[in-house]
Structure formats: structure tokens, C-alpha cells
Amino acid sequence: MSKSELLALDKLDVNLSKEDLLHIFNVFKGFWSYDRVAAEEGRVGLHAELKSKMCSDGFFYSKTVLQYNNLRRIIAKNLVRIYNDSGLQRPDYVAGIPKGATELGNDVAEILGAKNLNLIKDKQGRIVVMEKRNQASPNGTLLLVEDFTTTGTGFKETVCEIKGRYPAIDILPVELVILNRGAIEYILVKKYGSFNVLALVKHWINSWDPPCELCKIGSKRIKPKVSDENWELLENSQK
């Protein structure tokens, strides 16, 4: 389907396959892959620095797709489908890990009939709970939703923040994600246990500790999600 056809989709009961999801991200330029042919020709360009500080030769940028309400809702519906298939209980709360999954988490909460627990990134880039005046402290079960995961860095930070602030909250033992781009099946969070990665799609992308093989040929690291400008710089660095 073309970009215009995808934006015209209004049915939420579309079951997305791996091929469907990868096609959507390619159409909306939400996937970047390092061009090794260009590197051999001397255009070493930039490569991605992940949240874990690791280097990578591929990156998905969820904003390019999730900014469209219909596509985000279709993806949310598919996440709810695989969550329901897991047999886990309906959560009392759902939180999308910022910034990539904030609105996605809201959609999942609405579809599941759960409340939102709002998370934001502060000025230092830390994930924190956004509290409102006169709002009672949340209690009950919480489902965490993320756009993509590699090593679970953001998920671990989120669990520690929430449990440190609200010890009574029971975080359900899964991370619900669009795409697992690493080899992990579960995320171990010190003091808080193990959480299975429940992904709509698994798609392996290389990642290495720096300095990686791309660093060694002169390619510079860049954080793609810091800004739209960074994403464009990464996409165009080998042209």
C-alpha cells in the first residue's frame, strides 16, 4: 500500500504481520540502515547511538508513523490483541514510556478500558511520573508499553522510577512493545524481578559496545531520537 492508502485506513481490525509493519515504517521513512557500499566509497557518514550507549547499524524512528492517529490506533489495537492472547489480566493502569510511546500508551489504555499513568522526560532526560494536583496515588496493576526495545534500558529506568515513587503499584511482568530489535526475551530489573518482552514483531538489528566497527572506520555516533534534525542528519549522512 502507498502512503496515501495507509493514511486512508480507518479500520482497527487489521492484523499486522511483520512484513506489514516493516513496510509501513519503510513507506514513512521510519527505518534507517547503514549503507556499507557508500562507506566503501568513502562516505562513512553517521551511525546510531542507542539509549543504552551502544552503537547500531540500524534504527527505527517511531514518530514518523505514530504521529498519524489512524496508524497509531491500528498498531495499538494489534498490541492489545497480542496482550489479550497472552492470558494476562486487564491492567488498572497503562503507561507509555516517553517519548516514543506516550500517545501509544494512551491508545492502549483506552482500548483496554484502563486508566493512564502519565510519564514524561524531565529537563535532564530522566523518565519521571507526571503528577497532578489532588490526584490520588495510583494503586493496582500497571502495564508498560514501549515503541521499540533493544536491551531494555528505558524500561529498567521506568520500573525503578515508578516503584520508587509508588511501591504499592504492581507492575505486570511484561513489556508490551511494537518491535523487539534485540535478542532479549526478558528484561531483568534489579530488585524488581524479570519482565518478559511481549513484542508485535521481532527484527534483529546489530548493536555493539563502542568503539564499534563503524566508529573505527571514522563514522560518528549520533542520537537519532533527540530531534527531527538528528534523524535527518543520520538519514542523509551518506548521500
Image: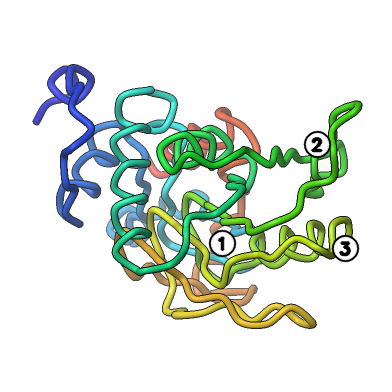
Q: Which residue is mark 1?
A: 218
Residue 213 horizontal/vertical position (percent): 50, 74
Q: Is residue 225 above or below residue 53?
A: above
Kind of residue indicated by mark 1: Gly
Residue 70 horizontal/vertical position (percent): 31, 24
Badge 1 marks a residue whose secondary structure is loop
Kind of residue indicated by mark 3: Gly
Q: Quadrant of the N terminus?
A: top left
- Snapshot quadrant of residue 23: top left
Q: Which residue is mark 3?
A: 164
The answer to whether the residue labelled 1 contacts the one labelled 2, judged by CB atoms less than 8 Å apart, is: no
- Snapshot quadrant of residue 27: top left
Give the alpha-carbon distance from disc 1 to disc 3, as whole Å. Answer: 41 Å
Q: Which mark is residue 195?
A: none
- Sequence-wise first label, 1 or 2: 2
The answer to whether the residue labelled 1 contacts the one labelled 3, judged by CB atoms less than 8 Å apart, is: no
Give the alpha-carbon distance from disc 3 to disc 2, as whole Å. Answer: 14 Å
- Sequence-wise first label, 1 or 3: 3
Q: Which residue is mark 2?
A: 130
Q: Is residue 211 above or below residue 147?
A: below
User: How does the figure colour the protein chain or chains?
Assistant: rainbow
Question: Is 180 displayed left or right of 168 in the figure?
Answer: left
Mark 1 or mark 2, whichever is nearer to me: 2
The residue at 44%/80% (across/down) is: 185
The residue at 58%/45% (across/down) is: 96
Residue 30 horizontal/vertical position (percent): 37, 39
Kind of residue indicated by mark 2: Met
Mark 1 or mark 3, whichever is nearer to me: 3
Question: Is 193 displayed left or right of 202 in the figure?
Answer: right
Instruction: Tell me, yes or no, if residue 100 can be seen here.
Output: no
Question: Is 12 displayed left or right of 140 in the figure?
Answer: left
